[in-house]
Image (cartoon, rainbow, N blue to C red):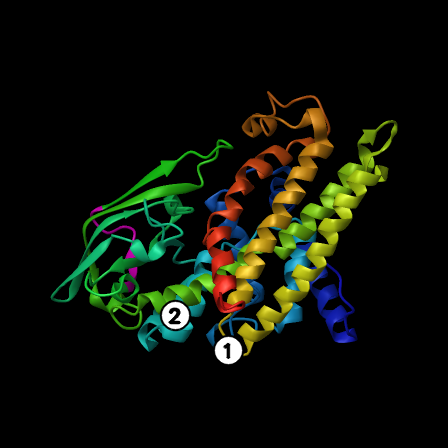
Amino acid sequence: MNLNYTDDQIAFRDEVRAFLADNLPARLSEKVKSGEELTKQDHEEWHAILNARGWLAGNWPVEYGGTGWDAVQRHIFEDEMTKAAAPRIVPFGIAMLGPVLMKFGSEEQKAHYLPRILNGDDWWCQGYSEPGAGSDLASLRTTAVREGDYYIVNGQKTWTTLAQHADMIFCLVRTKKEGKPQEGISFLLIDMKSPGITVRPIELIDGSVEVNEVWFEDVRVPVGNLVGEENKGWTYAKYLLTHERTNIAGVGFASAGLEQLKRIARLELSAGKPLIENPLFAARIAQVQIDLMAMATTNLRVISAAAAGQAPGAESSMLKVKGTQVRQEINALTMQAVGPYAMPFPSEAVDGDNAPIGPDYARAPTGQYLNNRKLSIYGGSNEVQRAIIAKAILEL
């Protein structure tokens, strides 16, 4: 999504483009374009390339190894990354845990974990949702009982993205049962290699294994792995979720998806003419582009506020709702544009021996459509976000 950039911003954009042209492995870019699942090694390779340039943590201040970029620079970087079909930066350590540790962690935790996030020594996952405690996260039941210098953790987390790769998990646990449920939650950092942890994969509708169940049975966690104060974890969780929901808006992903949709619509025919010339279809594309421009502007405002030390408020909920709606509309329009080439079983679309007859651009849309149905649910369902907006902004 282009803005009216200053000369310095144009120079920065050109620097990012040159870096991507010289350093983004073509093999990774092709996997992203085709919708092929990236391995842990793929992500680690790209993270290492970015970290060597000092560009892995665009949302971190310089003193912690980040870039110190302003909101527009971060927007430019994300935009150029998506245009180049670069792998996304896995958000759990960089975009979620990092800001929490910087604001609420001890000096020892910052000194130990932040460099390890950047260097790839720790791969993090997020232990929030549970069976019966997803959008209603305050009802979580995983417990942590203190015994001397350790917490003993028992319970279950679910929908834990990429937990099969993780070395560490940041986890919400119940440390007090009395009083309001939000007042008895703590924020723990747990080593996934600890005895008593079991990871079980969940196969998704698109055939991928992206999320997992994680079981804790008498897992011993050092007290030093508590972030902030005991029973104050709800405050830290809300802070993290505002950053997660802003990230979920996915302006860059939506921009790349919209450009791909336009390309397909120029190639596919409707009544003997390019589909993009169909007035009804063109009107839907135009509406998506208008919504995306408004969303990009709001996203810049929220990022600017966060850079000034403010935690995003209800605006992050607005971005989460609108961002997921826009991305799902782009997915639906792309499926419609591809038409009969849209494969019902996307795993077959990237298998060279079983690949369907049809253009290359027909391989990815079905998997993206099916997988992105989750966008309006995870990170707090859109219904919950509307309630937050109604309470915080409309005072209902």
Question: What secondary structure is found at the residue carrying circle 2?
Answer: helix
Q: Residue 309: which numbered mark, if any?
A: 1
- Out of 98 and 108, give the one closest to the viewer: 98
Q: Is residue 193 magenta?
A: yes
Question: What secondary structure is found at the residue carrying circle 1?
Answer: loop
Q: Quadrant of the N terminus?
A: bottom right
Residue on which disc 2 sits: 101
Q: Which residue type does callout 1 highlight? A: Gly
- Out of 122 and 300, give the one closest to the viewer: 300
- Out of 382 and 1, give the one closest to the viewer: 382
Residue 366 percent coordinates (x, y): 61, 33
Q: Which residue type does callout 2 highlight? A: Leu
Name the residue at 25% across, 52% down. Answer: 141
Q: Viewed as shown, does residue 223 lie left or right of 382? A: left
Mark found first going from the N terminus, 2 or 1: 2
Residue 243 percent coordinates (x, y): 49, 64
Q: Residue 97: which numbered mark, if any?
A: none
Residue 245 percent coordinates (x, y): 51, 59
Residue 143 found in image quarter:
bottom left
**Residue that protrudes farthest toward the front in the picture:** 396
In the rendered image, the vertical position of residue 243 relative to residue 199, given as above or below:
below
In the rendered image, the vertical position of residue 64 relative to residue 331, given as above or below:
below
Q: Viewed as shown, does residue 25 lie left or right of 280? A: left
**Residue that protrudes farthest toward the left in the picture:** 148
Magenta residues (range): 186-196
In the rendered image, the vertical position of residue 73 relative to residue 35, given as above or below:
below
Distance (Cα) linking label 2 and label 1? 14 Å
Residue 354 percent coordinates (x, y): 60, 20
